Image: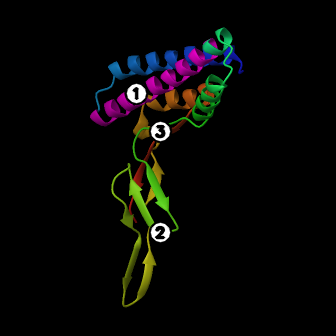
Amino acid sequence: MSDDRYYVHQLAVLAGFRLTVLANRLGCEDEFLLELHDRLIEGLARAIARVQSITALERQLAIDTDEEGLAAFQLHGEEECFARFRITLLDDLEIDFDTNEYHVNGGEWHYALSADCDGIEISYPRLVALTEAELGTLAPIVRAIRCEAGIGISIARVVYD
């Protein structure tokens, strides 16, 4: 069983950051930044739900004998998922190098291959991180979440070359 105090601490930290982002959103006038705030609030809510699931499974293991090991198996899976938890605020790019395809934000797959009389060219888009100026007052909050909560936050846009 894991250290339950760690997850109680994570729950408090994440809830505190969610309140901070909500408060910071009140002073925001830019539509783009409002959307980023909303997505971060939703991502933090998902992280909080995952931590609550972990603590519920820990309570269940503390109370029940779990002879079949199902709760322990679920707990291990939830802990692994939380360890890899990531919040994507803008664009997500997935590239399949085996088939030379890519898709953006879970949309349709596109071929990166093109051919003409000059030969074959493979051109994938790339992710470019937003600058601190573009993030405004959200930048220090995102840095603090990454540092204190250990949650990865991606704030990048897809650029086609």
Determine if the magenta segment contains residue 36.
Answer: yes
Mark yes or no: residue 9 visible. no
Q: Mark 1 vs mark 3: give the one in front.
A: 1
Mark yes or no: residue 115 visible. yes
Q: Residue at x 52, y 25 (%)?
A: 50
Q: Is residue 145 left or right of residue 117?
A: right
Q: Residue at x 33, y 19 (%)?
A: 26
- Which is nearer the N-term, disc 3 or disc 2? 2
Report the quarter where the C terminus lies. Answer: bottom left
- Reading the image, the residue beneath label 3 is 132
Residue 30 lies in quadrant: top left
Q: Main secondary structure of the magenta part?
A: helix
Return the residue found at the far top. Answer: 63
The image position of residue 70, as x and y in percent, is 62, 26
- Reading the image, the residue beneath label 2 is 99
Q: Residue at x 47, y 69 (%)?
A: 99
The image position of residue 21, as x and y in percent, is 43, 22
